[in-house]
Image (spheres, helix red, strand yellow):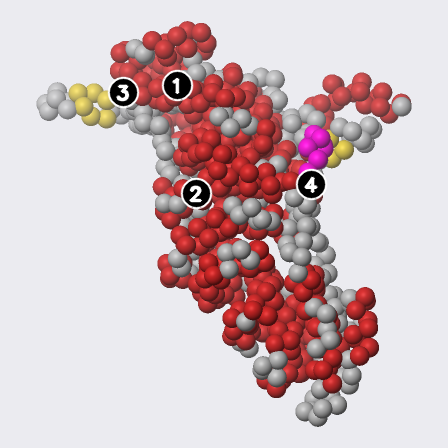
Amino acid sequence: MPGPGHKKKSKPRAQAAPQRPAGGNSESDAYVGNLNNADGWGMICDMLCVAFEIPDLTTKSGLKKVHANFDAVYRRLDKACTKYPDNERIVGGVLAIFAKMCADSILRNKLHERGLLTKLLPLLDSESTRHMALRALGTITHHGGGTIRKDIARRTTATLIKLIEEFPDDKVIAELVVTVLSHSISGVVEGEKPSDPTLLASLDLRAIFKVVTETSRKEWASQYLINHAVSLLATATLNAADICKAYPPMLKFLVAGLRSADWVMRCTCLGGIIRLHRNESELDMRTLDPNKFIGCIQRGFPPHLQDRMMDYGLPRCDTYLTLATTRDYQAAMMACAQDHDLRALGLKLAELILRTEFSIADGMFQAQDPRTGRLEVMDIGLPFTRWIDALPPCARAVRTRGNAKDADLADILDIKYHIMKQRIPDAVDVARKGLKRNPGAAYFYYAITLSADNTEGLRAAKKGLKCKHITPFVRFQLMQRAVEHAGNMGIQILQESPAAGKGRWEEGIAFLMSALEDAKTFVEEAPPDNRHMNAVLYWYILLTITINGPGSSTDLRELQSALKGRKIADDFCAAIDIRPPRTNLRLAQETVVKLYTAAAVEFGPVVQKADAEERLKPVSPEKLEDELAAWLENTHVHDEVDDELHGLHPKVNTNAVALYRCSFCGNPSAVLRKCSGCAKARYCDSGCQKSHWPDHKKMCSVATSN
């Protein structure tokens, strides 16, 4: 069927006379007079599609027909614009049809090459075509590729800002301008690095941020407008960080977004805040100088820290475990220097590695040169001189007996050596092979969590935490890695396109809840002097605020204990002469905590209003604009509904989040396998299912019998 398929507009189509106005006679141009009777831009576009035999642009088959005969189709439409340059209904309708074709990327590029923008931009100057032109720009930028979006940003930004300034109370202009700015400017600022630094530098980003932020605060601002504003501001924080920081209202807007009832808005804002500090942040690469560490211990801890360690139990605190391990490590090396028993040394080192993070220090056997008085490296007949290089030969010595237990201990030595040499892929490879032999070895799972792969790392952390034989050190290492992996995955998923499907959103929420659950356990149970306490507290604070959303108090009183915990963790660092690194996460939570109360007051009403609105509420009562919007958006080219186009986000049922957690290890995933018996329990793989069977057997039998 020709045209976009608006069946209710059949009457005007019947009036459309001769088709294919190839010539210039009055009979073939009868559609011109009919357009004067058209009721709205949607009807105008319908009639033009009939008159020019345009295939149904809402379907793939229709667009394929345009592909097959693009030059002829374009010539017919463009000729009408050339013949009637002063007829705004013809020019505007033709350009709207072109805009609709932009849903197809190839057609979009062809139209852009033929000067679509040059034809469209002048329509912004006319009152009768301004709204139509803005809607067309919105459609083009929504479907546009990076090149077109950047071109539109380059050529229209100043004009768009001027339009809002000239018509501050025009709701339609405000919404459409913010939409176009969001789509086009995002193409300039997104990515790890700007694709066009020159264009980025040429844009008045502060003016853009100000217009978008202030327009969102208008009493009549729609949810569609606010969503696009948030998307732009959150996208810009990485590559325009300095400008963002220099305009506090923008940051308060993002922080206030954490109070939204909409999961997507909360995670979009959180992602923007985290990216804000990435370029200035420091990596958490703290190392421990044994001599300095011992000196600090000898000086003693401040009373308030000493009290916390006494309450927890001094022998269980990391500081004292590290001190005792250092002593035992040096004793083991001295013993090996005397007896050259590499197997005994290897067994002792494997024990120490499972005790604390800083178990293996680099050193060497030295003696004083009697002539010069200087310390020199001694060769005492061992296959190593530097102590760290003792790990590989010790591993080989431990393996000599060939039993499984010794093989596990030897693998621990090899893994630790690779970690210390920063060869994480090699450590992970050894760990994977070791797990085939012994799936209950917690340290092997810990090694895998060090990889950059969040999915494998989280799965390993969750499985490792279920191991029956696990030392406190390995347990808390696995826990903090689980927090980091799950937190990163949850934020990433909840910022992706809704086209991935509703289940993906629920999976993302499951990741965040899993991260918060592990963070809470870590904060409550880990030693107060654990070096990862600060990082986990940052996650705990940010995740609590994000997950609670509008349920958080404006003064964050429920987080006062965690906020005090940050100071205590910093004091522990100072006590051993280590400066807490200004990590990305640390700076992000500082920004949120600092601005949260003020943001809730200033932008809380904006967020609440957006939450309360219906998603499909019309932007304005003007029939012409509504009809064109419906016409432009009526496309079924993609198999999935494009939620951004309609201002929609999926409604997430948090009660279903449990379906995305493994019944054994608790790992969140959307691809868990169901128990074939009860169909209720879900597992990562056969390993988790077998491990859980002793506990699940009774419940499964009852469910099956019912």
3D distance between C-alphas at marks 3 and 4: 54 Å
- Discs 2/3, front: 2
How many residues crowd around disc 2 within 10 Å: few (fewer than 14), some, or many (20 or more)? many
Residue 389 in picture, x, y percent from top left: 36, 29
Looking at the picture, how far across and down is residue 179, in whole percent?
56, 56
N-term mark: 1 or 4: 1
Please, what is the three-letter code of the amino acid marked with disc 4? Lys
Mark sitting earlier along the chain (1/3)? 3
Circles 1 and 2, Cβ within 8 Å, touching? The answer is no
For label 3, the residue is 292
- Residue in front for this viewpoint, 146 or 40: 40
Residue 316 appears in view:
yes
Q: In the image, which disc is placed on residue 651? A: 4
- Residue drawn at x 68%, y 50% is 617
Task: Choose the circle earlier in sequence order: 2 or 4.
Answer: 2
Number of the label disc, if any, that sits on residue 249: 2
Q: Which residues are magenta?
A: 652-659
Q: Amino acid at mark 3?
A: Lys
Q: Is residue 658 magenta?
A: yes
Residue at 68% of width from left, 25% of height from top?
664
Cα–Cα span, label 1 and label 4: 40 Å
| Amino acid at the residue labelled 2 | Pro
**Do labels 1 and 4 touch, CB within 8 Å?**
no
Farthest-out residue, left: 371
Q: Quadrant of residue 650?
A: top right
Image-based side of 477 in relation to 323, left or right: right
Query: Which numbered disc, 2 or 3, marks the residue that appears first in the sequence?
Result: 2
Q: Identify the residue position indicated by label 1 in the image.
A: 568
